[in-house]
Image (cartoon, rainbow, N blue to C red):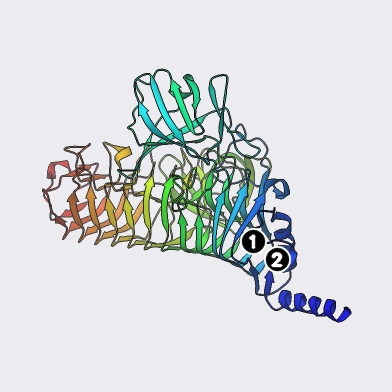
Amino acid sequence: MRLVILSIWILIFFQVNGQTIDVTQFGAHPNSFDDATASVKRTIEAAKGKSDVVLNFPKGRYDFWSDSATQTHYYISNSSSETEVPVKNQRVGLFFKDLKNLTLEGNGSTFVFHGKMISWVLDSCENITMRNFTVDYERPGMSEMTIRSVSQNQVLVSVHPDSKFTIIDGKVQWYGEQWIPNPKGFFLARVNPHEDKIYYSNWAPFQASKAEKEGTYGLKFSGDFSKFKADTGDVLTLRDAIRDYVGVFQNRSKNISLHNVHMNSMHGLGIVSQFCENLNYDRVYVEPAKGSGRMIASSADGMHFSGCRGQITINNCRFSGMHDDPINVHGTHLKVKEIISPTQLKLRFMHHQSYGFMAFSKGDTIAYLHAKALQIYGQGVVKSARLVSERELIVELEKPIPSQLQLDDALENITWTPALTLTNSRFERTISRGTLVTTRRKVLIENNVYYRTGMHAILIENDAMGWYESGPVSDVTIRNNQFIACGFNSAPGSYAIKINPENSEGVKNYYVHQNIQIENNSFKQIDSPVLSVKSTKGLLFVHNKIYKSDAAAKGKGLAAFNFIACTGVQISGNEFHDEEPVIQLKEMGKGAIKSDIKFDISDLN
């Protein structure tokens, strides 16, 4: 007997130190429907201090309950304000902290989460691979219902079985596992599955109506629906307007790879990476499970990158069913609120959803800029930085601040800015944009399909007055992509690509963005709008093919190209298969544009 016990312990020791740890060794068993949270915690603990460990999940279903989850306290960019969520306490199913050289091998397993949870957190980790698994929630945060009939005073719907509800005093009460939506507001989007489009809608007439249950999943709403627009078969998708959770949080981590990961449902923002370095996502699918009947996978973004650096690579991914942008890559502008000394500044987080994290660290290089003009006029190096409140931090610079610095100017951390390579991916069924990117490093967007994104397929902004998402781009290539009927929620400005820095003040001979190349793409847009560009130096639009969609035009007569305060623009060698396009120019100097398409030369100053 002693020999058997000794043999078992030798086997376990060998497996742990021989780079493989099986979660079944610590009590987690596939398809048991037991709470695997504590068992997986013990498995992760066993990996600490080991080298090149594989955390192995034999194929099957694993359930994670919030009761046993790790409690965390993170300030996460673009999530919630102090008013919306005063205390940032989160529960996490799989919590990885200070780990290196680890692979989570799912073997095709499904991780099902119960209650509001972050599915996994990587905090201060390095060389981590997550692969071959699916994430879903027993009760997704999104409630979905299909319209059976609609009239001016009544709407009948069939509620998806995953969307739990009851009727209280004639009103619908949606609920989940130990949670209900925040009563401060709902956000409703309408999916037309036949068109593969998501439209903005309004829950207010439903909230004001009388609700009655019909059968197990039926609901009848009686009230004033005279202004409500929908068709039979449309799917209403309803969520809490407050982003109290995210699907995944990766913080201050390095060399992270996600491979063959299916994100079928996520609360709030999606996969959020904050101050991370070198991220490689291959075959990550943000979409509802096939055959589930659900329409929405994420209550907000699909992938969100805030203040990252190194190389971000997104390849062979698919995004379908989002209430916000599938991809957003940006930094954060902080405003100067006090000049304490020649080398010290008090800075403030300005956007209500982004604050509380260390935006600067010792050794980081920063850019000084005038917020309204987005004009950069100097750089500095951080000597020290410390938070003095959730909203404010004090930064000490190694050298005196520039003489032209004024209160309400902004600072950007340019050390933490990433390069982005986005290839071979598909974007569909999203209510807003397809890809947002503002980074000064090299950007390549190639061989992707943008199919009926609600707003611009690609948006490049930069602002220090609204969302405070930085910064300028300096090397962008958009090549060999397909843009199909994008921008229907942006009409009449339904441009497939929009380069729109939010500079409210112009500066002579200063341009926010530069060096953007758009080549060999195919555009099949609703009516004409293809490209809108503002305050950019050096833009090449060549060898693209432009068709007009068969869909009904919503922006008839709009210019295909719209340029505002740009220079170094070249348009040549493109194929137009329907009609000669129109170029609209504003605040453009003589010689600012070269084009083989006719334009009104009197529009040049």
Residue with the mark numbered 1: 30
Q: Is residue 71 above or below residue 520?
A: above
Image quadrant where residue 336 sits: top right
- What's the distance in space between the residues labelled 1 and 2, CA to CA? 8 Å
Q: Is residue 532 above or below residue 120?
A: above
How far across and down, in percent of the image, does residue 303 sit? 48, 53
Q: Is residue 602 above or below residue 568?
A: above
Q: Residues within 10 Å of mark 2 (few under 14, many from 20)?
A: some
Between 30 and 428, the one lying in front of the other is 30
How far across and down, in percent of the image, does residue 375 sit? 42, 47
Amino acid marked by disc 2? Thr
Give the structural element (helix, strand or loop) at label 1: loop
Between 299 and 75, the one lying in front of the other is 299
- Marks 1 and 2 close (CB-CB < 8 Å): yes
Task: State the quadrant of the N terminus.
Answer: bottom right
Residue with the mark numbered 2: 24
